[in-house]
Amino acid sequence: MHSWAFDWHSPLRFLALAALAALFALPAAPAHAADDALQAQVREFASASVLQGPQRRIEVEVGSFDPRLKLAPCEEIQPYLPPNARLWGRSRIGLRCTKGPTRWNVYLPVTVKVFAKALVATRALPVGTVIEESDLAQAEVDLAEDASAAVTQAQLALGRALERPLAAGASLRQSHLKPRQWFAAGETVQLVAQGPGFQVGGSGQALNAGIEGQPVRIRTDSGRVLTAEAVGERRAEVNP
């Protein structure tokens, strides 16, 4: 794999974003001769496509073609992101010949690493550990290494119990934390419905326990049953 670091705070940011909308042209050449140029093309496209963020460092690793693959000569090759693909962690980018005697379409594997400060364990933490301040430290981690979001703020983890063990130095992820129960079935909860330009509040009775990240059914004072999301202590939110 070839590795390339991209700093969003450098002047290259503008050039990379401009390159995203452009078609990349290559002279006609057999696959083995154009391999490095295609990899550079994919790397530039991926770097321009990754969502920027403050104090992030981006690395893009591009895989190689199968040496047995023989591509027909092409005058113009366009990189693109396949449907449902995401440039985060392991992914792939498509390359299609848009101008040539034979149209073809291939994929190159890519790994996008997004480094930023997040919380890591200062020691090995077994399942059931209630996290204390001394258990965590800030370090640079690859946010894209795991599908679960990295925890970046200590207040979101302190007092929470671990649902999965966490090795010393490993990044703390949302999936490590046991979901909180914000209220029990039968309790009265504050209900908020909001959308673009409006917010309406009321109250209702929870028909099941309000577990963090899970839907909960609320019966309003008028008798209507709504599906909401538990967002805090005796609080639920409806998003139309």
Image (spheres, rainbow, N blue to C red):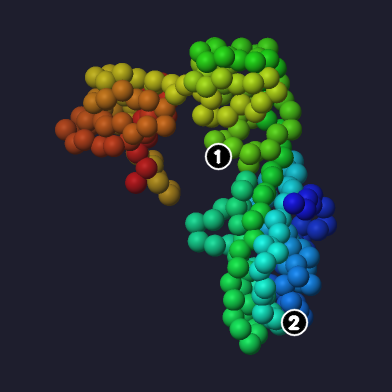
Name the amino acid, label 2: Ala
Q: Is residue 162 left or right of residue 51?
A: left
- Up the image or down, 171 lies above or below 129; here it is below
Residue 28 bears which disc, if any? 2
The quarter of the displayed image where residue 47 is located? bottom right
Q: Is 177 or 66 nearer to us in this picture? A: 66
The first of marks 1 and 2 along the sequence is 2
Say which amino acid is labelled 1.
Ala
Q: Secondary structure at mark 1?
A: loop
- Residue at point 58%, 72% (across, down): 105
Query: In the drawing, does residue 128 fall left or right of residue 152?
Result: left
Q: Which residue is mark 1?
A: 147
Q: Nearer the viewer, mark 1 or mark 2?
A: 2
Q: Give the alpha-carbon distance from disc 1 to disc 2, as whole Å.
A: 39 Å
Query: Is residue 162 something one can see in this rendering?
Result: yes
Residue toward you, 219 or 136: 136
Residue 213 image position (x, y, % from top left)? 42, 32
In the rendered view, would you say 9 is above or below 28? above
Characterize the local packing of mark 1: few (<14), some (14-19) or many (20 or more) Cα atoms within 10 angstroms.
few
Q: Residue at x 53, y 25 (%)?
A: 176
